[in-house]
Image (cartoon, rainbow, N blue to C red):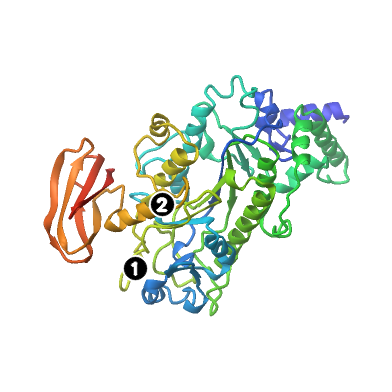
């Protein structure tokens, strides 16, 4: 069989791989995407989404030291020894897993924000469904055909792909490092993401090399196909030119192949510094479904979970170091997320089962660094079904990123998230006064879970004065007086049943002496 016959029969039989030289085959078609990696400016802000596949055990990641005895009692076989926990600077009641020393250092440098107890109402404990909820930003009882980032990118690239690339938008809206393009990037008409299948293929592509094929007649033809693909792609030269322009500067990256997350972030740093105007990058790290052997028996600070957390910590540290050395640190914001957390109580297999809320990390130079939210409450003698309580809906983090990082309009924000969610001021806007003000008000008035389904807890700080708390509708009309009496100094809590309230936006208003504070409450059935 000659090469012409081989190519024809291979195409008819579907033998051509779905990815060539690290790039999805769909991007190679006669779509305008083929020109997308041309050199571009670097004035736009960039978001890097780090997906932790499998459901990370948040309670062994960010450890509530103020409740250590309850934490230990709930998971004696996997609990990190108290003397091994890394104390967070200025937070004696909270610590990190000992494998996260690099993250701990970045926190001290003001480059890490931790959002406590993140999840969504009516948690679905299926990996597939919960992942879909996070990627689409849908309610647990609704199904969306588009992704939250895809909807945002649709507002920035109207009519995509028709008319793209162009002088204003010469580069791909989003890039996924991985074989499959994330549903988070799915727009109304098509995905706005482009896939780089893996780091090895990326470097082969930009260096002009190919995988070695078997020394057989079929292998020789496969080598020929790969060479033809490299030589005939119209944009190969521009991709190589952009990649050749930049060399990673950090020496902190682990040896290639030993930390897949670091390998992916290394590519992201190179592409961003190379001048691409791509706004969103997605990377991932798997292995977090730790039902069994999460730790090493007798040494619970080691094991599978410790290794994974260590990879996150060293990868993010190297990435931040690289961004700083490349002079682009202020342009990039990163966020980790996982489809759910794990249960409070460990199981008998040295592991943890599917749970609900968990902490989330943000990393970058332009953060109001710190911890947002309160330490999760661990009950006495938790059962195997007990979960950490929800405090922040994950869509509040999305809303904050869209509004304060990408500066979308209120109209577009509503279009993307399809509802209003309270924002958390973790994006720096000139100092930390915003965070301090927010933390002060939220010590005065704290509402969780929010959004609420059946009920919400209203926690407030009494100052030995008269306190009045009211529930108002979105137009400010009084609906209910929750309390109107004298409260001693200290923290007090009320429970508001929301099951009888229609879904919508409400306002909790507290008046205490001469001061008044309010917080938005979302009821979502």
Residue 388 or residue 429, whichever sits in front: 429
Q: Quadrant of residue 490?
A: bottom left
State the mark number for residue 433.
2
Above or below: residue 214 compared with residue 9: below
Above or below: residue 83 compared with residue 525: below
Q: Quadrant of residue 261?
A: bottom right
In the rendered image, which residue does mark 1 sit on? 378
- Measured as percent of width and height from the top left, residue 110 is found at 52, 57
Above or below: residue 302 compared with residue 169: below
Secondary structure of the residue carrying tag 2 is helix
Q: Quadrant of residue 48?
A: top right
Q: Is residue 282 left or right of residue 413?
A: right
Residue 501 can be seen in this image:
no
Gap between marks 2 and 1 measured at Cα: 31 Å
**Which residue does the image show at 17% across and 48% down from the upper left?**
470
Quarter of the image containing the C terminus?
Answer: top left
Q: Residue furthest left?
A: 485
Residue 133 or residue 446, whichever sits in front: 446
- Measured as percent of width and height from the top left, residue 380 is found at 30, 73
**Which residue does the image show at 40% across and 44% down from the upper left?**
395
Q: Is residue 360 left or right of residue 474?
A: right
**Which residue does the image show at 37% across and 72% down from the upper left?**
67
């Amino acid at each position: 069989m000659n090469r012409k016959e081989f190519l024809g029969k291979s195409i008819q039989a579907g033998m051509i791989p779905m990815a060539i030289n690290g790039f999805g085959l769909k991007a190679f078609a006669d779509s305008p995407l083929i020109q997308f990696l041309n050199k571009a400016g670097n004035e736009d802000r960039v978001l890097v989404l780090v997906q932790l596949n499998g459901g990370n055990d948040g309670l062994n990641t960010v450890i509530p030291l103020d409740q250590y005895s309850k934490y230990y009692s709930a998971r004696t076989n996997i609990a990190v020894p108290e003397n091994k926990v890394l104390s967070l600077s200025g937070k004696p009641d909270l610590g990190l897993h000992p494998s996260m020393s690099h993250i701990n250092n970045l926190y001290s440098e003001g480059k890490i924000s931790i959002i406590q107890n993140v999840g969504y109402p009516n948690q679905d404990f299926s990996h597939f469904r919960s992942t879909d909820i996070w990627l689409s930003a849908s309610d647990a009882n609704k199904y969306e055909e588009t992704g939250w980032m895809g909807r945002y990118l649709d507002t920035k690239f109207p009519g995509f792909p028709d008319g793209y690339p162009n002088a204003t938008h010469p580069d791909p809206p989003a890039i996924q490092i991985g074989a499959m393009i994330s549903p988070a990037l799915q727009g109304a008409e098509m995905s706005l993401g482009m896939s780089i299948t893996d780091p090895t293929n990326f470097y082969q592509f930009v260096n002009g090399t190919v995988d070695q094929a078997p020394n057989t007649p079929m292998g020789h033809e496969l080598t020929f196909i790969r060479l033809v693909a490299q030589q005939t792609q119209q944009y190969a030269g521009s991709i190589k030119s952009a990649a050749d322009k930049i060399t990673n500067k950090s020496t902190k990256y682990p040896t290639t192949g030993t930390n897949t997350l670091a390998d992916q972030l290394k590519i992201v740093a190179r592409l961003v510094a190379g001048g691409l105007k791509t706004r969103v990058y997605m990377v991932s790290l798997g292995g977090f479904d730790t039902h069994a052997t999460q730790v090493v028996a007798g040494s619970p600070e080691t094991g599978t979970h410790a290794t994974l957390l260590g990879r996150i910590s060293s990868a993010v540290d190297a990435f931040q170091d690289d961004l700083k050395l490349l002079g682009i640190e202020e342009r990039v914001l990163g966020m980790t997320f996982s489809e759910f957390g794990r249960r409070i109580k460990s199981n008998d297999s040295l592991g943890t089962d599917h749970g609900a809320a968990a902490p989330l990390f943000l990393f970058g130079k332009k953060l109001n660094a710190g911890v947002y939210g309160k330490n999760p409450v661990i009950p006495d003698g938790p059962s195997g079904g007990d979960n950490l309580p929800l405090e922040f809906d994950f869509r509040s983090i999305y809303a904050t990123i869209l509004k304060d990082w990408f500066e979308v309009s209120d109209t577009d924000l509503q279009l993307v998230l399809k509802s209003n969610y309270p924002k958390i001021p973790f994006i720096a806007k000139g100092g930390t006064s915003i965070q301090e003000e927010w933390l002060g008000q939220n010590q005065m008035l704290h509402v969780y879970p929010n959004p609420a389904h059946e009920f919400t807890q209203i926690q407030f700080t009494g100052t030995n004065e008269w306190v009045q708390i009211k529930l108002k509708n979105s137009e400010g009309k009084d609906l209910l007086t929750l309390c109107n009496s004298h409260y001693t100094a200290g923290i007090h809590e009320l429970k508001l049943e929301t099951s009888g309230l229609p879904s919508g936006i409400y306002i909790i208003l507290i008046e205490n002496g001469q001061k008044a504070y309010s917080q938005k409450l979302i009821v979502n059935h």
